[in-house]
Amino acid sequence: MAQTVRLKDWDKSSPGISEISSRLRFSFETGQIWLDEERMMLMHSSALTVLRKELIDTLGIERTRGILTRIGYAAGLRDAEMVKASYKDLSDLELLHKGPLLHALEGMVKVELKDVEIDIKNGRYHIDAIWRNSLEHQIHQGLFGPSHYPIAWNELGHATGYVSGIMNRFILHKQVEITPLGPRFVGKPIEEWDEVADELKYYQSDSIVEHLLTLQDQVEDLRKSLPQPILPSDVIGDSPRFQEAWSLAKKASSSTVTVLLLGETGVGKDVFANAIHNSSPRANQSFVAVNCGALPNDLIESELFGIEKGAYTGAQTSREGRFERADGGTLFLDEVGELSLKAQTRLLRALQSGEIDRLGGTETRRVNVRVIAATNVDLAEAVAQGTFRKDLYYRLNVFPVSIPPLRERKDDILALAERFIDKFSAREGLRIKGLTDKAIHALQSHDWPGNIRELENVIERGIILASQDSFIDASMLFPPSYTTLLEENITVLDRQGKISETVKQPINDFVTELLDKKVPLEELENLVVKAAIERCEGNLCATARLLGISRAQIGYKYKKIFNETISK
């Protein structure tokens, strides 16, 4: 049964004020503000005043109201997603209360409740409240004077978006009057309103915008109809060094020249090799790949050149090798620097003459194969050390293409991540909304020693941990130790809402100091538990959520600390 809650009950939800404000982080070194996983920004109210006036002067009242309402709605939905991801097992009232707290933290308005009823499971909701200290109301009245029609457009959109997000159904909020304290608004399910058409139009896309998007699509279709070089879809990157490498590869694709792809492990040499083949006149022929480093030395020759029956013990049938299978197409030799000297000799002959002999055979076979080789080994150094033939090196190094590591093309990380999200979400049957701002920050801050392969693995991990219709946050991509290090030199709000002047110590230095001082583990745990209880103002449920443990565990620890304090 739904519970009607009065003002005194609403106030009981307020112990979370200190806890939710502590989620705001300021990084002065990087110029970033974070609210959980979302990047935020501070903006002058005078700038918002100019923006509102420009929009109204340019688009008129109605279109401006629609734009600001939809912006508020999107922000409300995002706040709801953040709350549902960060707080588990909250009561319906506590879940609802987080929305006004976030809106207050964001500096928009203070909600003063008159009446509320909420029952998420049964879809019941009603609120009657007043927006006090409404920034939007203040700005509009400053521009146009007192008004009797609704002017808190962004706040209406936010309320509708947030409550719709936690209720999992559309809940419409309307401004019903202007009181001496501020705008009064009422919210309830859409079917309980008598007239909604005039309000719903503000939540729908603007016809002008739709027309512009249609024109944009038409222009894009015209562009696609123009002849242009084919860029294989898996080759992603706009950074200068990457485009330079791909430009060289495209030039090589139209010829039969041997290409040597250079780069660290995981940079995408196999993708480049496929792309060169698919852009070449041989695209309709076979593309055969072999990892020279993954095969034992006694098998690599038979894999490359084939065998005849009886060539060695166990060779009961004749079998063609990779060169024959790639005849007319492309052979990709990955990790070519791992080949034995004997295999290098036979490879050199095949490259120079286009002829091969199967192991144990007497018949010479001609093959028409375009070779693309790849290595993360410095072949010039290998030649100097005598582990790689000099003549083969010169034969392979006709057209070298150096692929940059991911740490040198960080502008491409998001595009690559989006491609992997599409790939793995389709495989897992999930709808993923994207990456949180904190997750994007984590991806761009990482050095990526494993390059694109590591990025692909990280995104796959995130997809597996994500839920349907959710965002991937930083904790799903990296272990907690890494995401903690990202918050070095972060300042927070104290209880009075002031920015703390102490800069957060790097976690490694903090641990070193504790070890140097020989702080007992039990004492350290008690210190953390006490601080968490104090931050949550005695709310043990909130403390348990903050520490990531159960309510029973925090109750036990609290009782233990309390008894120790009494005994002293």
Image: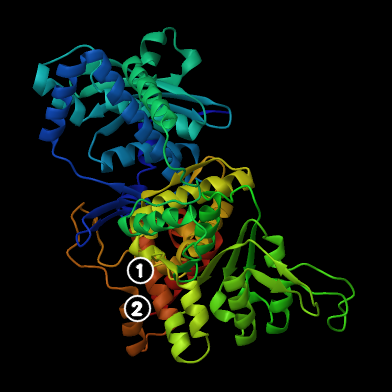
Point 36% across, 49% down: residue: 437
User: Residue 365's x, y, as percent?
Assistant: 73, 68
Point 19% across, 31% down: residue: 135
Mark 2 crowd level (few <14, some 14–19, many ≥20, 10 Å Cα): few
Contact between labelled residues 1 and 2, with CB atoms less than 8 Å apart? yes
Amino acid of disc 2? Asn
| In the image, residue 429 above or below residue 2 | below
**What is the number of callouts on the image?**
2
Judged left or right of residue 479, residue 411 is: left
Point 28% across, 20% down: residue: 184
Query: CA–CA distance between discs 2 and 1?
Result: 9 Å
Judged left or right of residue 21, residue 376 is: right
Residue wearing tag 2: 508
Whether residue 482 is visible: yes
User: Residue 147's x, y, as percent?
Assistant: 17, 13
The disc placed on residue 273 is none
Mark 1 crowd level (few <14, some 14–19, many ≥20, 10 Å Cα): few
Residue 31 falls in which quadrant of the image? bottom left
Whether residue 555 is visible: no
Point 10% across, 21% down: residue: 143
User: Residue 355's x, y, as percent?
Assistant: 67, 70
